[in-house]
Amino acid sequence: MAVILFDIDGTLVDTTGPMTRAIHEALEELPHLPKPSEEAVRSGYGLAGNAFWEHVIPEATLEEIHLIRRLRHTTLEKAIEGQNVLFDGIRNMLETLHEQGHTLTTASNCGVHYMNLILDTQQIRPYMTAPECLESVGGEKKADILTAHRIRHGEGDYIMVGDRKSDVEAARAHDFPVVLTGFGFGNEEEWALADHVIKSPNDLVEWINR
């Protein structure tokens, strides 16, 4: 059995719509700043910490970014309430892998609030063992999350599942095989770096059980 590490955005969920609405609502407190498009938000997924905000709202100062991040906690909770943001087939895939005895967990560049919001609103926490994100491990790069998981789970078979180059880089730092989602936010250049690319969540189950 393997420890399967899942990125969140572009791998398990697509929160682009609710996230954009939440950012727009937060920016009502800062009307001099432009409101980003959904494409700008989507293209920022995978960036860690303030890098995401610097990409999405480059006009904002660091102080303004801190304020937006605080406001976004509340606005995103409202925007995502009652919304199913899981990619089609994700729940069945997680349930199947969990029943087969694999250890499932998360390795995302997001913050703790966002990770918990996704796990709880999408009702997928029961499938996850000790989920971690960049903030929860106090890390600087995604490879630090994988280090934390290795310490917790020990040596064994690991698989990193993500959608962007940052997931590949983290996996390579630990010599883990890496699977990218062809339905996520990545592109052909990033997919070429992976050990395998899946077209649907069920493809992951088939690849692991090959």
Image: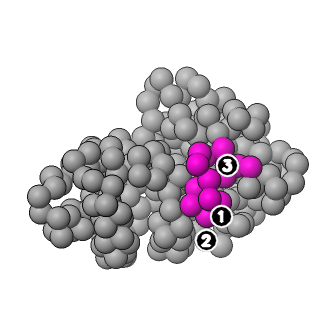
Give the alpha-carbon distance from disc 2 to disc 1, as whole Å: 8 Å
Q: Residue at x 76, y 34 (%)?
A: 175
Report if residue 143 lies within the magenta region. Answer: yes
Locate residue 50, reporting x and y percent. Answer: 41, 52
Residue 97 shown in magenta: no
Residue 186 point in image, percent of width and height: 45, 35
Contact flag, marks 2 and 3 (Cβ < 8 Å): no
Tell me which segment is drawn in magenta. 133-147
- State whether residue 94 appears in this view: no
The residue identified by callout 2 is 125
Mark 2 or mark 3, which is nearer to you? 3
Q: Secondary structure at mark 2?
A: helix
Q: Residue at x 68, y 38 (%)?
A: 171
User: Reading the chain from its start, which is encountered first: label 2 or label 1?
Assistant: 2
With 64 as the anchor, is 51 left or right in this view?
right
The CA distance from mark 1 to mark 3 is 14 Å
Q: Identify the residue under disc 3.
A: 144
Label 2 close to label 1 by CB (< 8 Å): yes
Tag 2: amino acid = Arg
Q: Nearer the viewer, residue 198 or 61?
A: 61
At horizontal 59% and vertical 45% (from top left) the residue drawn is: 141
Q: Amino acid at mark 3?
A: Asp
Residue at 77% over, 45% down: 158
**Spatial distance from mark 2 to mark 3, Cα to Cα?**
22 Å
Q: What residue sits right under mark 1 in the picture?
A: 131
User: Which residue type does callout 1 highlight?
Assistant: Pro
In the image, 19: left or right of 146?
left
